[in-house]
Amino acid sequence: MKILIIEDDARLAALLRRGLVEVGHVVDVETEGVSGETAALDGKYEAIVLDVMLPGRDGLTVARRLREKGIATPVLMLTARDTLDDLVSGIDAGADDYLRKPFAFRELAARLRSLTRREPAPVRKKLSVADVELDLASRTVTRASRPVPLTARETAFLEYLMRNAGMLITRRMLEDALWEKERETSSNVIEVFIRRLRAKLETDGLPRLIHTVRGAGYRFAAASERDVQS
């Protein structure tokens, strides 16, 4: 999941980012309201963690402006205040949930999971492509019913491939989905992850699933097609 944190407390933002990255999320951080709103408008995020008290533009205004511009991304509002009026103000501004500081990281992670499940379509518990299964709750992977040990980043990489199975996936698509916007990926980092996933998924003579499309990118599919070169 790609998450935007808009929080001016550098220490708290760093702690939240580290905790979310460790469980496999991609996290961008903005430290003031105007840049945070711009990032929310320009980036493709699945959740936003938004502090109420921000320099430049407060969180309530940011949330309200995002909703006015048609941004429906779930927003978890953070605040040091917890009166009923504060709660009502946050919800009226467009927040989906409200978390009072101080809080435990586990509670924030649980709130984010709950928010991102609130969608019209039935929530998918597993992704399945060919004989590969990814359990979205436990973040465990199997191929041909055998466990495949992956790191958090490798699992996020595989999840993106599986969600886009059969489609051409370009390098730019992978960079936008799986790396923070301020981080420059080295020239071969994507190839490194592709090699790692192939080595772990395609052992013991199992058929290739990650195919290289010459000059274009990759395709995750059960069999090679005419325009792919493994």
Image: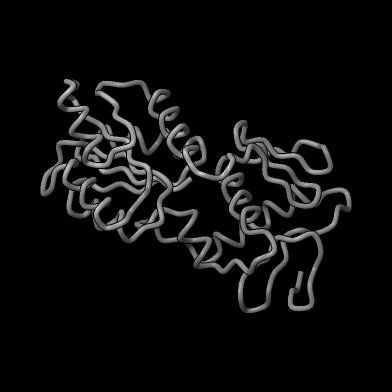
In the rendered structure, the answer to whether residue 43 lies left or right of residue 199 reads left
Residue depicted at 15% across the width and 25% down the height: 85
The residue lying furthest to the left in this view is 56
Residue at the image point whose x is 25% and y is 32% from the top: 78
Q: Where is residue 194 in the image (x, y as percent from the top left)?
A: 65, 58
| Rendered position, 207 above or below 123 | below
Q: Residue at horizontal 69%, vertical 69%?
A: 212
Quadrant including the C terminus: bottom right
Q: Position of residue 4 (x, y in %)?
A: 35, 46
Image-based side of 3 in relation to 63, left or right: right
Q: Where in the figure is residue 134, as x and y percent of width and height?
A: 68, 41
Image location of residue 224, percent across then percent down: 80, 68
Q: Looking at the image, which residue is at 86% across and 52% down?
A: 206
Above or below residue 100? Residue 224 is below
* Above or below 107: residue 215: below
In this rendering, the answer to whether 51 lies above or below 102 is below
Task: Work out whether residue 107 or residue 229 is closer to the camera in this orientation and state it.
Answer: 107
Q: Nearer the viewer, residue 23 or 119?
A: 119
- Residue 202 vs residue 5: left or right? right
Count of residue discs: 0
